[in-house]
Image (cartoon, rainbow, N blue to C red):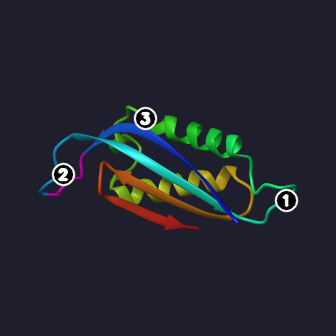
Amino acid sequence: MRVGVIGHFDSMHLLPGNPHCGVPHGHTYRIEVSLEGPVRDGIVLDFGVLKGILGDILRIYDHADLNRILAYPSCENVVSDILRRLKERLPAGRLRVRVWEGEGKWAEEEG
């Protein structure tokens, strides 16, 4: 069974050497997180717990300069960093993180 929550944050970044994104600019990011695992006592994980952990992590990125958090803050690297942080705090299970960088553009990783 898979359960999931959605969060958001706003931040800015630049991608050094990128012809389109090499200047400071901002995005509204949408983060979708799902956790797959067995149903125990009727649930995989309480939605409130999952939403709370995701919220704690997203506060790191909200209204921040992502270049101060990640060496190369591409959408792909944001996904990997959020996934790593979630793995540190969640029980065993298969996680999936999808990050939307504005409308129509996203990266996703499972682990």
Name which residue lies at 36% across and 59% down.
106
Tell which tag, 1 or 3, sits nearer the viewer.
1
Distance CA(mark 2)–CA(mark 1): 45 Å
* Amino acid type, mark 2: Cys
In this figure, which residue is indicated by the disc labeled 3?
Answer: 62
Name which residue lies at 68% across and 49% down.
89
Q: Secondary structure at mark 1?
A: loop
Horizontal relation, residue 53 to residue 24: left or right: right
**Which residue ends up furthest to the top in the rendered image?**
63
Distance CA(mark 1)–CA(mark 3): 33 Å
Horizontal relation, residue 8 to residue 3: left or right: left
Q: Residues within 10 Å of mark 3 (few under 14, many from 20)?
A: some
In this figure, which residue is indicated by the disc labeled 1?
Answer: 40
Q: Position of residue 9 (x, y in %)?
A: 42, 38
Q: Secondary structure at mark 2?
A: loop
Q: Give me the disc on residue 21.
A: 2
- Specify start and end residues of the magenta stretch as a single range: 14-18
Horizontal relation, residue 82 to residue 50: left or right: left
Q: Position of residue 14 (x, y in %)?
A: 24, 46
Q: Nearer the viewer, residue 19 or 5?
A: 5
Name the chief secondary structure element in magenta.
Answer: loop
Q: Position of residue 85 (x, y in %)?
A: 58, 51
* Amino acid type, mark 3: Asp
Q: Secondary structure at mark 3?
A: loop
